[in-house]
Amino acid sequence: RIDGRDAYGIAASIQEIIKGLPDGFNNPVLTANAVATQTMKMDGSRGERDSIIVGDGVYDFLDYLDLETDGTSYIHSHEFAHHLQYDLGVDQMVDGLSRSEEMRRWEMMADSFGSYFLSHSEGGRMDQTRLLEVHRAAFSLGDCENSIETHHGTPRQRECASNFGSNLGFVSFVDGGHIIPPAELMVKFEKK
């Protein structure tokens, strides 16, 4: 625990670091994240005002990669997938997995769910050419820091999870648009 004087000192140091970045406080790196939030009521139960927050830095990064159209669809579908995971209880820890492994499972399942929607005949209806861009966005947002708790999966793992989901969705063009229920989609992901 730190006292007020120390907290102000740390804040001042951080502000100086940020001022030294190109464009200072307007640097897109400072907003390079997307999150799906879930509200909680005072009694600990889940609320009804869930949201998705996407920072400008994410859009700048996708624009830089020339993925501003389908890349943003990937980001949104991935974050909406987290809300499905909340509803399915996937946010609960799985026995035997480290925090890093659990985070990677969580994020790659969202990649898979999101790409399933984007490729489905009743969803995004994206063709293979557009989905290659989605997979490239997933690849570009991977990281190689598998020793940290917030590890989201390597670039190849994220791309693979995205491919897995879209391949399941493509079947909808030949099976009359059958929609795999989210719980069943989760089981399919867990088996892979």
Image (cartoon, rainbow, N blue to C red):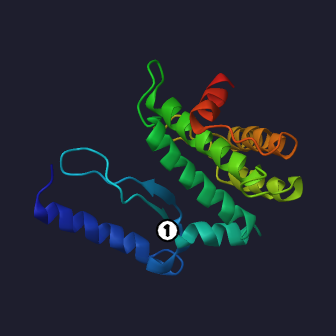
Residue at x 63% of width, y 72% of height: 60
Q: Which amino acid does label 1 sit on?
A: Thr
The quadrant the C terminus occupies is top right
Q: Residue 54: image x %, image y %?
A: 52, 66
102 to the left or right of 68: left
Q: Height in image: 21 above or below 158?
A: below
Residue at 36% of width from left, 60% of height from top? 49
Nearer to the camera, 139 or 68: 68
Which element carries disc 1, helix, strand or loop? helix
Please state the horizontal and vertical placement of residue 130, each as a whole percent of the image: 83, 59
Residue bearing mark 1: 31
Res. 136 visible in picture: yes
Residue 146, can we see it? no
The answer to whether residue 172 is left or right of residue 148 is right
Question: Quarter of the image holding residue 189?
Answer: top right
* Residue 78 drawn at (x, y percent): 60, 52
